[in-house]
Image: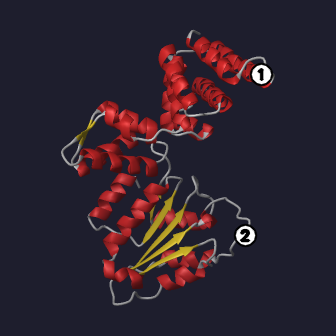
Amino acid sequence: MEYTQLLKDLNQQKVSSLYLLYGTEDYLIKNVIEKIVSASLAEQERDFNYSIYDMKETPLDIPVEEGETLPFFGGKRVILMRNCYFLTGVKEKEKMEHNVSYFEQYIDNAPKETIMIATVSHEKLDERKKIVKKLKKQGIVLDANPFDEQKMLQWLHEYIRDSNIDMTEQAKQKVIQLAGKDMMMLASEMEKLSLYVEAGGEITEEIVEKLVARTLEDNVFELVDHVVNGRSEKALRIYYDLMKQNEEPIKILALLARQFRMILHVTNLKKTGYSRQKMASQLKLHPYAVKIAEGQAQKYNESMLTNVLKELADADYNIKTGKFGKSLQLELSIAKLTDM
């Protein structure tokens, strides 16, 4: 089920007996769990009827047996099973023995009084396993893997609406660029921005620039964009700022090379007909990063990208052999790349 549809159902108190939440976006899983618990239990019921188990440390029999018992004082019982790696192909070093057949029997006759939630922070399930097939057939399943740009913008739209604020299109793109690496970070930054402008206010690109923290990778990402578009003055300004912050030139050089290698990979994969989502999976990148790399790739052909990477490799050699100082060599390379 889609994340947004699942939230709508839970907001309308539509709760199922079985949930399977998997994927690498922990924020989405955490948010859905909170919604399920809120829709199922009053605050005063949680001490008695809400149980959390780590399946790396707990045999499966224990939460399943609890699921078969009636909740205290009637009503509902919620059982959360975390780290259900027995649903994936991952081989745990200290594998807990789980009675999976017992859970399969439970699924066939899941009590209506119990809401059983199985979660695992892993991008894929083992679809060959009988238990996975049963859960997918009889439960509600959320694929909580990274959003593509369209879904991220949809999430932003709903957040903005619910928070009673406005946000310019440029601000949306900028906050996705800076904080869209995972939904936990994006949600945290949006909460900060919405508190800053207060209800009825508008978040602009300038406000995002002012409040959203930048990592070294973010600055290098922007530096690359200026290099790609031939904006040497802006590229060098970022570089000088990084030097004032005592960033290591060799580390910046390595990040520059990584970004251009990514552009080359995206160029090659696109030729083979890969979709943006498939490229993101293959390169283990966020779909938005692939979109940016696609746009940057339009400025180069394969030969030009090869020359860029050769220039960066030569710069690395010159620094390590002492031919040029680190800072001077990187400054020269940035200036040269913007003219390519």
Q: Nearer the viewer, residue 101 or 10?
A: 10
Q: Which residue is mark 2?
A: 94
Rendering quarter of residue 252? top right
Say which of marks 1 and 2 sits in front: 1
User: Who comes first in sequence, dot 1 or dot 2?
Assistant: 2
Residue 50 image offset from top left, x and y in percent: 42, 79
Q: Residue at position x 63%, y 71% from top?
A: 56
Image position of 239 with respect to 95: above or below: above
| Left or right: residue 71 compared with residue 292 | left
Q: Nearer the viewer, residue 87 or 298?
A: 298
Point out the image quarter for the N terminus: bottom left
- Say what secondary structure mark 2 lies in: loop
Residue 154 image offset from top left, x and y in percent: 34, 43
Residue 280 image offset from top left, x and y in percent: 56, 38
Image position of 10 with respect to 47: above or below: above
**Residue type at tag 2:** Glu
- Mark 2, residues whose alpha carbon is within 10 Å: few (<14), some, or many (≥20)? few
Image position of 252 with respect to 325: above or below: below
Q: Which residue is mark 1?
A: 317
| Left or right: residue 183 compared with residue 325 | left
Q: Residue furthest bottom?
A: 73
Q: Label 1 vs label 2: CA separation?
A: 44 Å
Q: Is residue 230 visible?
A: no
| Left or right: residue 78 compared with residue 285 | left
Q: Residue furthest left?
A: 200
Q: Residue at position x 57%, y 35% from top?
A: 279
Q: Nearer the viewer, residue 325 or 191?
A: 325
- Say what secondary structure mark 1 lies in: helix
**Residue type at tag 1:** Tyr
Residue 308 image offset from top left, x and y in percent: 65, 17
Point out the image quarter for the C terminus: top right
Total label count?
2
